[in-house]
Image (cartoon, coloured by chain):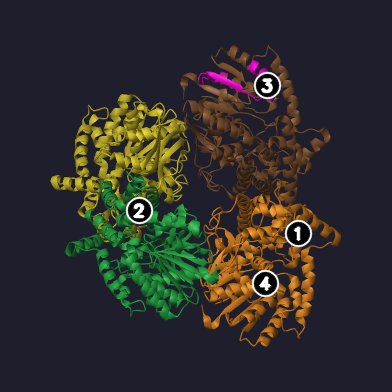
Chain colours: A orange, B brown, C yellow, D green
Amino acid sequence: MSKQQLKLAVIGGGSSYTPELIDGLIRYYDEFPVAELYLVDIEAGEEKLRIVGELARRMIEKSGKPIRLHVTLDRREAIRDADFVSTQIRVGGLDARSRDEKIPLAHGLIGQETTGAGGFAKALRTIPVILEICREMEELAPNAFLINFTNPAGLVTEAVSKYSKIRSVGLCNLPINTKMQIAELYGVPEWELFIEMVGINHLNWTTRVAIDGRDLTSDFLSKLAGFKGVSMANIPDLEWDAEFIDSVGALPCSYHRYYYMRDEMLLEMEERLRETGKTRADDVKEVEAELFELYKKPELVSKPPQLEKRGGAYYSEAAVQLMKSIYNDVGDIQVVNVRNGGIISCLPDDVAIEVNCVIKSDGPHPIALSKQLPPHIRGLLQIVKAYEELTVEAAVHGDYKAALQALTLHPLVGDVPRAKDVLSDILEKNADYLPQFKR
Amino acid sequence: MSKQQLKLAVIGGGSSYTPELIDGLIRYYDEFPVAELYLVDIEAGEEKLRIVGELARRMIEKSGKPIRLHVTLDRREAIRDADFVSTQIRVGGLDARSRDEKIPLAHGLIGQETTGAGGFAKALRTIPVILEICREMEELAPNAFLINFTNPAGLVTEAVSKYSKIRSVGLCNLPINTKMQIAELYGVPEWELFIEMVGINHLNWTTRVAIDGRDLTSDFLSKLAGFKGVSMANIPDLEWDAEFIDSVGALPCSYHRYYYMRDEMLLEMEERLRETGKTRADDVKEVEAELFELYKKPELVSKPPQLEKRGGAYYSEAAVQLMKSIYNDVGDIQVVNVRNGGIISCLPDDVAIEVNCVIKSDGPHPIALSKQLPPHIRGLLQIVKAYEELTVEAAVHGDYKAALQALTLHPLVGDVPRAKDVLSDILEKNADYLPQFKR
Amino acid sequence: MSKQQLKLAVIGGGSSYTPELIDGLIRYYDEFPVAELYLVDIEAGEEKLRIVGELARRMIEKSGKPIRLHVTLDRREAIRDADFVSTQIRVGGLDARSRDEKIPLAHGLIGQETTGAGGFAKALRTIPVILEICREMEELAPNAFLINFTNPAGLVTEAVSKYSKIRSVGLCNLPINTKMQIAELYGVPEWELFIEMVGINHLNWTTRVAIDGRDLTSDFLSKLAGFKGVSMANIPDLEWDAEFIDSVGALPCSYHRYYYMRDEMLLEMEERLRETGKTRADDVKEVEAELFELYKKPELVSKPPQLEKRGGAYYSEAAVQLMKSIYNDVGDIQVVNVRNGGIISCLPDDVAIEVNCVIKSDGPHPIALSKQLPPHIRGLLQIVKAYEELTVEAAVHGDYKAALQALTLHPLVGDVPRAKDVLSDILEKNADYLPQFKR
Amino acid sequence: MSKQQLKLAVIGGGSSYTPELIDGLIRYYDEFPVAELYLVDIEAGEEKLRIVGELARRMIEKSGKPIRLHVTLDRREAIRDADFVSTQIRVGGLDARSRDEKIPLAHGLIGQETTGAGGFAKALRTIPVILEICREMEELAPNAFLINFTNPAGLVTEAVSKYSKIRSVGLCNLPINTKMQIAELYGVPEWELFIEMVGINHLNWTTRVAIDGRDLTSDFLSKLAGFKGVSMANIPDLEWDAEFIDSVGALPCSYHRYYYMRDEMLLEMEERLRETGKTRADDVKEVEAELFELYKKPELVSKPPQLEKRGGAYYSEAAVQLMKSIYNDVGDIQVVNVRNGGIISCLPDDVAIEVNCVIKSDGPHPIALSKQLPPHIRGLLQIVKAYEELTVEAAVHGDYKAALQALTLHPLVGDVPRAKDVLSDILEKNADYLPQFKR
């Protein structure tokens, strides 16, 4: 790695999350000394990019770190010879997200940004753009790592792994949040805690908890009666049923609520939309508007506390931890999205999974699971992964048949007539972003 | 095989289906010369057993075949030294079936005898009784084949395979009906048609159709627009959507409607119950009452045409074909339920599957699939099979946790609060038949 | 299948075995009515082709069957629109075979036509020619079956399966001979016997023997003390050690002697060569010379009894049985060489194996094994199969590295310096037949 | 882990290697503060134990570390409540080793302590004793880690993993030596180097070399022309053939010479025995006699440089590194022997393998391989592992059939008559140590 001239390109640099990332880059500068930092965005995001760029510049100046900041619309320039390319894009913006949440609800289905029919629509829009970025990386920075935050992160990782030669890692802040919360539960620092997370992005289970070599899994599960699990800003945090958790034998993740508490979640979403006319995307729009107002203020030289409302807790932590472990060949364990390669033996080898990995300078190496998955974890994992495989095919090839089968298979859709209707709606309302579907 | 004294024990001999079986035994006597035929039933079914037994006696007499008929309540006597034991029992009778259909509907779920929460309840009641029969076979007829018709046939086969040393085959009349209908579609005799069926009982796909070595699968699929598939007397035969079938790339079975047309099926069931107060079990009761009136008539010496309304077309065909192929070491191909053993590589080795098998005198040998399963078939198959694995554990060990996870996992249940409620209802209303659940 | 005009092309039609095949085609004409029979050979074999062709013509004439015989050097004409293409070629002729036997012996290694370094050399010469035939079939008879007898039949089948779209079956007379001998041992007709053969061509084990559904495996193994197993004309039939056979728990095949009795086999081969200056190839040359003298006699109108000395007992039986089962969609069980596809789970999916298959009109469908392979069978099978995979790569791509690794890995070679020497010798002495190796 | 009272029991404490271990415990005391150190041995080794014990006492005293040393023949006392139990025993002593080397040579086979027939004999003697120790650990220290150095370390680890509940790790100094040598080759400190080792104990391949994230595998392989690989004191270090290494695409380990250079290795062993009447064991005896003379000297207070001749370079390094990483939950990567669990997908799940593992406080977690094994690595690995599986069965159950199959399968034996003879010799000459074989 070119230690002298470490270059990082942030695609979607105009994101409201960027100050979070800048903060992390500054804090960890000694271990991860970015020399050239490119914030790049598309023309439609120029205004936001400019605002965020100026805040970033003020933050860096104040820090005194010798990070050279470049704010640009020229993606090729940003990528050229980069060591790391991180992506935090949102194809279609928050308007598209709002549609992803509302279209399914209009068909009586859960409407969520990354799960179910909403996540499916987002995947169709996002995967082709990410693969375009990969093509540019293959040409301009073939040895760079793609650090992908863009949701649905698991689907995107799988698409990149199947259709590009670029080394990529999919990253989510859910695992680090889970670890933080469990550490807090036990009153130990996060680094004394060992957890085994198994699954795929936004559908993983914490199957093992150990502190200092002592296996605390049973004790941990008994503590979960009424535990809300990790709160994610975007998910209503209903409590887990004690008897149910006991029978799972593992801690589900927050997104599991969409499966395990389907009825109540749907009801809550429907009521909220009916009462307020809004979904999560609409709130986020408001939060973002406020944030950008804040960002504009010249006196602001650090990430504002209001950013936390936006969600994405520990986002920069996860990102910088990963990049600095690669950069420094640290060999610590982080939960990231990688190619399966036999680690979860009940899934195909070439799919993306989210598990404990050792992070070395050549990227993440997944670690063997310490126990076999029980049927109730295995079955749900397999059907959702099969949905993801179909969705990747649909997104890459504009394959209508794969798209229809993907939605039909998804446990949150299932019914064919409904799958056809919601698919038709998705394709129509996202037509501008889905050139691959020329029917 | 003791060719001189071929002995067949029919457990649940008082079933209204029995004349169908007797008819088959007579027709195929030359190839499958049953010398000793035992019809056995429990005390509660004595009256029906007597009626059916007398009809059977008249049928045999008329045929002139030297089949010695024994009608008895002594199951051990029936099993002792048998070559084949066939089971067609219904634990709890039609009243239990009626509850299996109604309890789920009361919770807004599909209520069906073998699929979903209804089939789950039936499995809990049935598996322990079948394993009891296996224990007796291990003692009294360890080399006999258990030919199991009792639903849910796949779950029962899996339980026997995991928890008994008895050689058993699970049998269903769906595959043979499918083959008959496709043969009819092409205007060829059934034996000129080759089909590849893959899956598990009541959830299998016809992935390949060939006549005389020519692969007709594509042509066949294009013919399915509006095709109702195999009509089973117990399933509303909604038409398949042409676009959907094209995207499956295979013919789903009738029971797939519960998954693929979930909403409409549920609606139809709910409406029917609301309008008539009845489910399929109630109809069957009426049909059975009529049948037994008929059976009583001394002038009846053959199976009455009314029996067809009962469902179970080609039932005796399937049963006798299987037994005579074993008896004569025929080596023909039949679709039956057997231990997987790697044939469907995305499922565990020790589960039951329903696929093409070569029938030799030592039983069925499954044949390799001619192509890999696509993700949309794989995913659904895997989740339902995982549900079945959990259900077998619940049924055998009275394991509440496994039961809760089974229902939660099932695509037709899913939601945890609902799963808990319907499970609680099932356990309470079937308490007399579920001694293994002592909570 | 074009039942009116069944066309069979026999490539290597000038082989001394051909009368055997003609005899079979005549005997089974009613079930496998070949209308057009092409015997084709290369120019170098024209004289032999003419002699065999005339004998074939006399045999057919005498039989009165309406088989139209074509004797030609035009391979494309022979293949065009054929239903079956059978190959019985010998690239380099018996001189090459003689070298295959002598080169290894000169290096202190077993020299055998299909096993070890000799079989390796034969594979290098043969595979490219067979793939050339496949290219022609893809163009001229894409739906035909390739019935390959050419040794090493397993390696050839694997190469065709990996590098061609042609449907092919690899055939050997060892399985049918084994079955015949076991049937004789028990005094039952061959068709009453069921055996399970598992492995790869010339390295398979009979793991199960049943008559009429009764498992006789233990009894069978106890009978093998001193049993010579199947005698193949080309293999010294040393007796099996009783204690050893008992510990195998299965009947090894004749070719296993090269592994299990390596020292004695090598000694015998070395002594024979030293004493007589001859190997098996030299004997065969003499036998063939005599045979062709016989074949020339106009009064000869049937296969002469002397042909049996040549080896290849039941050769036509195996070939015609296979083709007529495909032609008539019989569905009987035959042991042939096919793509693994998971049947032997400890081997890769895409390799060729030799196991029980159901023969339908679309070809052979392998049947699940009835038990897992024990480590001592598994280990030997795996290493020899890995050798075969490397040999296929070497043969197809002229890959020296794969060739060196193949020989090094082979249990009958092993030592690297020796592997290099024998490889160098093989490449040099077969240079005319190995254009793919341009070093 | 009881951080206050860290207790280590060294079984076979009277070994000449012990000062090496003591040296490591002193050097790393701060990170691995052993409070109670037990050296235990059997009665026959009392004299050596006393000598080593006194030297250990002097070394500890000089170091000033508060390690309480216990020298005892009471194994149960040593094991009771231990945190770590390390085993470095030699059942039968060097006399047995001498026989292990000479018996095979008498049959024309390679005679080596851990490989081939010699290693087989050692396994038969050693495994039952180690399992006896495990039984005591299950009773007296069920949470302790067994750190096993006793050869054949892979076979022992597999036996413990299959037949005991004790957590155990098998350790060898070959991997650390390999890493040290490659680091030296590149002039980098060992900890900057990443290597991927894959295989089983004494049969592993270095398939990948990276420094600072740059993959140097190709460069590394090109450097190996004439490279002797890691020198082990006990293996003649013949040079690797450049062309051969290039075709392997990985660095074989030293023990591979017994396979890849079989002829020359055997010749060298035979010549040496003929000329000197000695094998390696005899040299070791002399070295040990000298060492114990040295150890007796009261002025000796550190491990003497002569110990290096004994072999076992970096032995204490490997042992203490492993134990301190477990103790401190370090999470670094070390190559150790563990249960496979799917990491090497072409081997059974329940066998022992030797691969990169992350060392956490609950032991080693194997890491996914970065690439699939090519056939030439796979094939050799599979056959030797199958030999090991059979050997474990033979050792645990005294199973003569498994023993005969094990030796027959081993690539360095192969021939059945020879396998029978050498087995007979082994069983007879080791009869005192093989109570499990009561024929």
* Cα–Cα span, label 1 and label 4: 22 Å
- Residue C311 seen in the current view: yes
Badge 3 marks a residue whose secondary structure is helix
Note whether D165 is above or below A132 in the view shown: above
Residue D98 falls in image quadrant: bottom left
| Among numbered discs 1 and 4, the one appearing first in the sequence | 1
Note whether B376 is above or below D57 in the view shown: above
Q: Is residue B365 magenta?
A: no
Name the residue tied to disc 1: A238
On what subunit does the disc labeled 3 rest? B
Q: Which residues are magenta?
A: B26-55
Residue C318 falls in image quadrant: top left
x and y percent of residue B131 in the render?
A: 59, 35
Q: Give the crowd class for mark 1: few <14, some 14-19, many >=20 residues within 10 Å.
A: some
Name the residue tied to disc 2: D124
Amino acid type at mark 4: Tyr
* Cα–Cα span, label 2 and label 4: 55 Å
Residue A86 versus residue B32: which sits nearer the camera? B32
Residue C413 versus residue A257: which sits nearer the camera? A257
* Cα–Cα span, label 2 and label 1: 59 Å
Instruction: Name which residue lies at 75% across and 48% down.
Output: B418
Q: Give the crowd class for mark 2: few <14, some 14-19, many >=20 residues within 10 Å.
A: many
Residue A228 versus residue C291: which sits nearer the camera? A228
x and y percent of residue A111 in the render?
A: 75, 58
On residue A314, the disc is 4
Q: Give the crowd class for mark 4: few <14, some 14-19, many >=20 residues within 10 Å.
A: many
Amino acid type at mark 1: Leu
Note whether C283 is above or below A50 in the view shown: above
Amino acid type at mark 2: Leu
The quadrant of the picture occupied by the N terminus of chain D is: bottom right
Farthest left residue? Answer: C275
